[in-house]
Image (cartoon, rainbow, N blue to C red):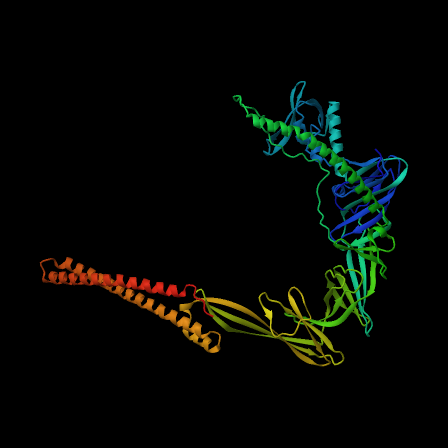
Amino acid sequence: MTTRSTMLALTAGLALAPLALAAGPALPLTEVTLYRSGVGAFSHSGRVSGDSTLELAFDAAELSDVLKTLVVIDRNGSAPPVASYAPNRGLAAILDEFSLDPRKPLMSLLENLRGEDVRLRTPEGEVTGAVFGVENIANPENGVNRQHVTLLTGSGFKTIERSQILSVDFLDPDLAEEVRDALTALAKHRDEDQATLEIAFDGRGEREALATYVHSAPVWKASYRLVMPEDSGEPLLQAWAIVENQTDQDWEDVSLTVAAGQPVSFTMDLQTPFTPYRPSVAPPYAVSMAPQVFERELKARQSVALNDRAPARSREMRRDLDTAGARLEEAEATYNLFAAAPSERIGGIATQSSAAGVEAGAQFLFTFDSPISIERGRSAMLPLATEPIDARRVTVYTNGMTEPMQGALLTNTAAIDLMPGPIAVYDSGAYAGDAQIAHISRGEERLLTFAVDQDVLVVPEATSTSRVTKLTIVDGLLVQTSVDRQTATYKLVNRDADDPRTVIIEHPKMPGWDLVDAPEPVGESPSSYRFEATLKKDDSVELTVPRENTRWTRYALVDYDADALMQHVHNGAASKRVQDAFQKAAALRNDAREFEQRIASADARLNEISQDQNRIRENMRRVGNTSDLWGRYTAKLAQQENEIESILENRDALRVSLKSAQETLSAYLRNLDVS
C-alpha cells in the first residue's frame, strides 16, 4: 500500500555530532538548534531517489542518544523507512565466542590449552608435544618460584621454564586461526569509536526527505554590553550568543537557532542488547480431584459470556482501523511541520536584531536571520540584538554589605528575553565594570551592580524593643500577647558635589515580621524589600524602616507573677475582668496550698515521731525489761502511738479537703475565657 507520507520516529537523545554521510542520498545539515541544558537538535533535509540507503555516522557512545530521538520522514515513500545498526555487544560478549581469551598472559593461555599440540622454541632447540600443564616450581638456588610448562613428548614429559620459551607454534591450524581471530576481534573493538546507522528508503522517483535527531552539545552562552550615555540619551543593550561547533562536520550555511529553554534530557543505553533475568519456575502440575457438578444457572451465564466476545472483538477491529487512519493523518501533519522552511516553522518578528526571537511553548527561541557557517572544532560569537533599553543609574546598598555599589535598574523593554550571562557596562564612554544577570523576561525589571560607589556612604543602625500589648485568659491559661519591634535606620550621605544619587536600599525580610510605619517599598524580591531615597549633591538623608512581630505566650494562670499582672492592668494591657479572674484563681489556689502545707506538716511530724521511736526501741534493747527506764520507754511509746493515730486521721481529712479544693480550682479554670 502506497501512502502519501511515511515517517520513522525513533526516540533518542540530542545529537551534536551531525550526520557524516556515506554512500546513499545526500541530506545536508540544514538546521541546528542549541539549548541551555547541554543538548542540541540537528535537522538534515534534501531529496532521495528510488530505493536508497542513508548512512549516518556517529561516535559509538552517541548512538543511544540518536536512537532515543531520531525522526525520519520520507514524503511519498512506498513504505516507512527502516533503520538498522550494529548493536554494541561489548568485548566480553564478543570474546565469549572463542574458546580462549587473548587478554590473558601466555602461560594462562597454555594452561587452558591442555592436550593441544604445540612446538616451543628454546635456546637449546625445539620441543614438540602436547601441553600437559603449567605450574610454579621453586628455584633450588634461591627458592624463588618460577613458571614452567610441561609437555608430553614422544619420549616422556619435558618441563621448560617460562624464560626459556622464545616462541610458541600451534600445530593445529584451526586453533592457530582461532587465536588470530580472537586477537583481531580484540584489536577491532579497541579501535571502534564510530557507529553507523543505516536508514533504508523505499519508494519511486525523487522526493523530499528529512532526518532530525538530538544529541549532547556544549551549552550556548549569552554575553551582553550595556552602554549608558553621558547625556540624556537612551541606554543601548547589545546581546551576543557564543556557540561552539564540537562536531566532526563543518556547519555550512545552516539555519541556527539558540533556545532559552532547558528541556529535560537523559542518557539511556539503547544499543547494547539486554536480556533480563528470568526466575526458574517448576512446571505446573494438577492434583487429581473428584468430579465437580456445576449448577445449571452458572453454566448458562458462562455460555452467554463466551458468545458476547465476538461482537466485542469486531468493535475492537473497527477501532483499530479508525486509529490507523488517524495515524496516517498525524504523519502527514508531522511531515508538513518538518518540511516547512525554518522561518515558517519557528515564526519571526521584524526587529533591528540579528536574530528573530519568538516564544515556542514554554521557551524563547532566537533564530539568526542569515545562514551561519562555523568550521568544526571552532567557536563563534554571533550578534543576537542591538536595541535601546530602559535603564537608569542607581546606587544599591544591600543590608550587610560593607560598601554601596554603582548599578542600574534595568527594565527589559527589548523584544527578546535576556538569558543568564555577564554584562560589560560602559558608562559615559568608558568601561565601568562587569555585572551578571539571571533570566529576564520581556517587561521584567532587574537590578544589577558593576562597581563600588565611593562617593556614597551608608551607615546602618538597628534597635529593638518588646512590649506586652494584651493579656487574656483562654481555657484557664493566661495568654500574653507581645509585640517585638525592630527599627533599622540607614543614614545616607552623598559626598559627590557634582551629581545627585538615587539610592536603593535592600532591606532583608524576616518570616513573621511585617513592616509598620515604614516608607512604601518601590519593589521587593523573595528575600528583600527595596526602598528608594534621592540624595541631592553633597546631601544626606535618613531612612527608617520599622517592623514588628507578634508573639503569644501561654502561662498557668495561678503561676503568673501578680506584680507583673498589676503592672499590665495599669498599662491597659490587661482588663479588670482579667485581674478579678486572676485574683479569684489565686484565692482558690491558696486554699489548696494551705491544705498542702498542713499535710506536709503532718508528714513531717510523723517522720519525727518515727525517728524518736527508733531511738527509744534501741535504748530499751540495751537496758532490759527489769530497769526503771523500761517502764518509762513503754509509756512514751504508747503516748506516741496515740498521737500517730490522731495525725493519720487528721491527714486523711486534710487530703479529702485538698482534693475538694483542687477540684474547685480546676472547675473554675476549666473553659475559663476572659478578655
> Residue pushed farthest top?
154
Tag count in the figure? 0
Query: Does 567 sit left or right of 41 as displayed?
Result: left
Could one spot residue 485 in this view of the protein?
yes
Quadrant in the rendering for residue 633: bottom left
The vertical placement of 536 against 17, above or below, is below
**Is residue 12 or residue 587 the one in the foreground?**
587
Q: Position of residue 321 (x, y in %)?
A: 76, 35
Q: Position of residue 327 (x, y in %)?
A: 78, 40
The vertical placement of 120 against 450, above or below, is above
The vertical placement of 147 against 593, above or below, is above
**Is residue 551 or residue 103 the one in the foreground?**
551
**Is residue 109 or residue 145 the one in the foreground?**
109
Quadrant in the rendering for residue 92: top right
**Is residue 413 or residue 490 the one in the foreground?**
413
**Quarter of the figure with the N terminus:** top right
Q: Position of residue 315 (x, y in %)?
A: 72, 34
Quadrant in the rendering for residue 115: top right
